[in-house]
Image: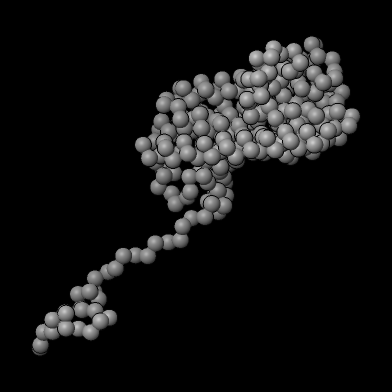
Amino acid sequence: MSVVPAGALPAGVLTAEEAAAPGPAPLGPRARLWPSLAAVYRAQLSRARVARIPLLFVATFQSVGIMILMRGVVDGGGEARAVVAGSSVLVVAFVALNLLAQYFGQLRASGGLDHYATLPVPPAAVVLGAAGAYASFTVPGTVVTAVVGCALFGLPLAHLWILAAVIPLAGAALAGLGAALGLLAPRPELATLLGQLGMSAALLLGVLPPERMPEAVRLARDLLPSTYGVEAFARTFAPHPDWAHVLGDLAVCGVVGVISLAVATWAYRRAAVR
């Protein structure tokens, strides 16, 4: 048997050792955002389903109780609209801001982010999927709170369909803020504290009529993401709603939602690599 040097072989002809050696396996296709988002959303929704009834009860009971208390102080008019709209959006703040901050704070402290980091899903899918799952629980409570509030204060029910836009837009803004607070907080206790402070701000600045607030408090109210969802909903109770202002408030709420979710995605990447 003759031995032929490898350099004497024609180009494109492999030696026996090269033919037998396994080459690098081809990489699979990169995970797309929307299928990954749907998978994370379904997983988070099924995981949180056990706490669904207590969650809805606490959030709804809290907002309805606040409206009953305010009924003895506010009779009607613009103040009643602010109370009903603020109490309805408060259900979204309780879940999307407070509970989501606690969830991501505990996830970071327990090493749960390492599990998501090993999955072939984009970071934005993890944040958006968890935020969407938590925000989904707010829909029944928000609708019930709005209907009860309209009955208490004698407000019309004709434009409650605007909640189909208020809930996702305000939920996105508050969920992004809650996720960012949970991911950036160095300890889970601090994440819980920040989430509760944020919900308290949504309660005080969103439910109380702005006409009775000092000017400095009004400026702080304008910085709260849920304020624009409250304003959009409250305007629809007028006899002739100013739909241009309603759309403007919803647009601001949507822009804030995009920014807050982008910040939360950046915070997730930052926390996952540490």
| Residue 111: image location, x then y, percent | 39, 36
Seen in the image, is 186 located left or right of residue 151? left
| Residue 97: image location, x then y, percent | 58, 29
| Residue 218: image location, x then y, percent | 68, 18
Residue plotted at (47% across, 50% down) = 121
91 over 164 or under it: above or below: above
Seen in the image, is 145 located left or right of residue 271? right
Colour treatment of the image: one colour
Q: Is residue 213 visible?
A: yes
Residue plotted at (40% across, 33% down) = 110
How many numbered marks appear? 0
Q: Is residue 100 visible?
A: no
Residue occupying the far bottom of the picture: 1
63 over 173 or under it: above or below: above
Quadrant including the C terminus: top left
Quadrant including the N terminus: bottom left
Seen in the image, is 244 located left or right of residue 202? right
Q: Quadrant of residue 155?
A: top right
Foreground: 47 or 165? 165
Residue plotted at (71% across, 36% down) = 250
| Residue 68: image location, x then y, percent | 76, 17
Residue plotted at (54% across, 39% down) = 262
Foreground: 6 or 30? 6
Q: Quadrant of residue 75?
A: top right
Foreground: 179 or 51? 179
Residue occupying the far right of the picture: 239
